[in-house]
Amino acid sequence: MRRRRAFASAFTGRSAWAHLSLLCLALAVVLGIGWRQFDAWVARTELPLTLAEISVEVVDREGQLLRVYPVEDGIWRMGVRLDRVDPGFIEMLIAYEDHRFRSHSGVDALALMRAAGQALRHGRVISGGSTLTMQLARLLEDGPTGRWSGKLRQIRLALALERRLSKDEILTLYLTHAPYGGNIEGLRAATHVWFGKEPRRLTPAEAALLVALPQSPEGRRPDRAPEAARAARAQVLSRMASRGVLDQEERATAARARLPHQMAPMPRLAPHLADRVLSETPGAQRVSLTIRADLQARMEQLIEAAARRAGERLSAALIVADHHSGEILASVGSPGYRDEGRQGFVDMTQALRSPGSTLKPLIYGLAFDQGLVHPETLIHDGPVDFDGYAPQNFDGAFRGDLRVREALQLSLNIPVVKLTRELGPAQVMAALRRGGTDPRLPGGAPGLAISLGGAGLTLQDLVQLYVGFAAGGQGPDLRGQTNGARDERPRMISDVAAWHLGDILRDLAPPPGARAGVLAYKTGTSYGHRDAWALGWDGRHVIGVWLGRADGTPVPGAFGGDLAAPILFEAFGLLKPAFDPLPPPPAATLILSAAELPAPLRRFRSRDAVFAPAADAPQLLFPPDGARLALDGQTLPLKLRGGQAPFVVLADGKPVLSGAQLREFEIPSPGQGFSDVVVVDAQGRAARATVQIDQ
């Protein structure tokens, strides 16, 4: 800040005698020590550092700015290339500040004499005599400068700079260091904060303001001193018209243009991804991401609006990926990078969470490949108990026999746990790793609960997994940098199994108002309603959505289908005007009805089914085994499921009822103490329970 104030003061408060004295001083030095000595004196000049720290930049796939990082003391100073600066601005700057810039050797004696003469005639400063090179010398000088010794140092430094640098290099350094108000240094930072754009194309009004600002960066700030800024701009425009750079109509139009009323914030798109990539590539000055800036902006707005609708402290995250290339096209880590109430600084695309039901497609895909089931295979949804683990469906209901296709579409828990038991949890974990995920287990070895979300995964993990589904069972690695290699994952499931998953999930009912049959998608809700998920794909892209609280607090009533699925479909609508069609079935796909399937595939039976009761065998729902009942001398109610009437009931081996046609009836109390109750159906199949009766 001290350097910027010193630079500005060089243009204010300078007396008429100062110009004349400066010129006389320079002439005296040359005459006093001789030309050769003067030449050697200039040659011995020690230059200050010209390689100043500039802001690290993160750009999108087309080179558009996504994120800028300030340098020391919070200064925005961005690198400049002359071939990417509006030529009209360069012409205006040189014509106004130093029209003999291309011909002098660092000091313009004619300009100094003119400035001194004008100052003597008018008693005040009319124009400055400093060249752009001398102004650069002031900017680069990092130590205090005395009134005369400092000016002499600037002349010496300007002459030395001209000997060691080209004119374009000097101009580039000036445009990198010139102050433009506040903590803004350099032309590119200035055009971003004052006009929200790169300096490739500037209007005459914009160029004139940028020419005028460095002379008094605080006194002419358009947000704080609009009248001074307008007058300074008008002065530049007037001189440009007098020198033929602008015609009178252009000058008049530019003079009427509105001034920016405030500084715009520096670009901050994809901040979480930018932070992560930079931490992985220390020392990088410019990083190019696969992100599409326009899409990223739309997705950030979508997530911000969705979180606002969902609740005060809810966070949300989203990833859009191309499953052909693995490129991440948009990555939103939170609804607001600086939203403290939602803990927006936490990148929820990388947070470990329970995936809920979103892993179920993988289980079914593996079961298809193992020949355990086909989408048309019948599977029984009823009470189960695996060594004390008795999973329940989300709604607590059972649906009996149904097709595997329907079991996945309804996201039932019991059928998928049965399949996980047959596959083995270790095989599921291996497939997850082949698919590119890094599952974390809360305990030791994986158990059956893994199929219901009993492992920690990130949103990026799940998008990677679904890239595999969408790409036919073997997809590319996700990547966020344009220079990243395209690496293919090992095959996770077969192309036939992957097609079956897409065919099943495309038939899920879409959210209200959304188009049906165009998107294969799956929702999920983790235990305690902590996480709501939706992941889906079409023929080209995969999108994953997560909602919840960053601190893991439950969100009562939060369901993936209600909260996340509408965002998923809306995101696809923002991505492109139409869905890409899902692929046709591979040649080896078996598309048959249940009746046409080979006998072993018509109904799912576990490998130990020979020792298990048939799916339609009688089941004693009440009383449950081990129940303790206080009957007070009343009858004992029984409730059955399955079996074939008529039924016979035995209590402690003695018949107490026969010929029962219904599945709910009562028997006399067996008496106080423990009793064995057995129900036998017409085919001789039995269901039993041991109960304790308290009279």
Image (cartoon, helix red, strand yellow):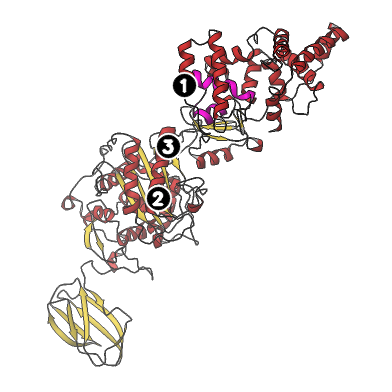
Residue 40: horizontal and vertical position, in percent? 83, 11
**Which sits in the foreground, 382 or 335?**
335
Q: Residues within 10 Å of mark 1 (few under 14, many from 20)?
A: few
Q: Residue shown at 52%/38% (left/top)?
A: 274
Q: Which residue is mark 3?
A: 297
Q: Which residue is mark 2?
A: 308
Going by the image, does 56 lie left or right of 410? right
Q: Mark 1 belongs to which amino acid? A: Arg
Examine the rendered structure and indicate whether residue 53 appears above or below residue 243: below
Residue 295: horizontal and vertical position, in percent? 40, 35
Q: Which residue is mark 1?
A: 256
Q: Residues within 10 Å of mark 3 (few under 14, many from 20)?
A: some
Q: Which residues are magenta?
A: 189-215
Examine the rendered structure and indicate whether residue 216 appears above or below residue 291: above
The secondary structure type at the circle numbered 3 is helix
Q: Quadrant of the C terminus?
A: bottom left
Going by the image, does 460 lie left or right of 374? right
The secondary structure type at the circle numbered 2 is helix
